[in-house]
Image (cartoon, rainbow, N blue to C red):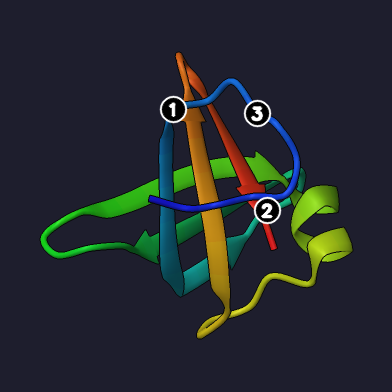
Amino acid sequence: MIKVNKMISARNKFIGKVKSVELQDLIGKIKINVTAPIKITCVITREAVEELKIKKGDEVKVFVKATEVIILK
């Protein structure tokens, strides 16, 4: 499990490496490898991808809450 300095209600937390980033007009599709055999694919705004400067090979933290995916870098 991931330890974070701030409290968060999400209980499904993973650390992974970005396998690929596919940017489209308004969205970015990010594939993340976490603990084998789990792979996560998420779709977030293109603006979020650019602000976080997410790129292939980055280590990221993934928080899954209900139908939402939150990425912390």
Q: Which residue is mark 2?
A: 72
Q: Residue type at mark 3?
A: Ile
Q: What residue is drawn where x is 44% and y is 27%?
A: 11
Q: Which mark is residue 37?
A: none
**Left or right of 35: which side holds 31?**
right
Q: What residue is drawn where x is 70% and y is 31%?
A: 7
Mark in front: 3 vs 2: 3
Q: Residues within 10 Å of mark 1 (few under 14, many from 20)?
A: few
Q: What residue is drawn where x is 51% and y is 85%?
A: 57
**Left or right of 22: which side holds 54?**
right
Q: Which residue is mark 1?
A: 11
Mark-to-mark CA distance, 3 and 1: 8 Å
Q: Answer yes or no: do the residues labelled 2 and 1 have beta carbons within 8 Å?
A: no
**Left or right of 6: which side holds 16?**
left
Q: Residue type at mark 2?
A: Leu
Q: Residue 69: image x %, image y %?
A: 54, 33
Q: What residue is drawn where x is 65% and y is 41%?
A: 44
Q: Residue 41: image x %, image y %?
A: 39, 49
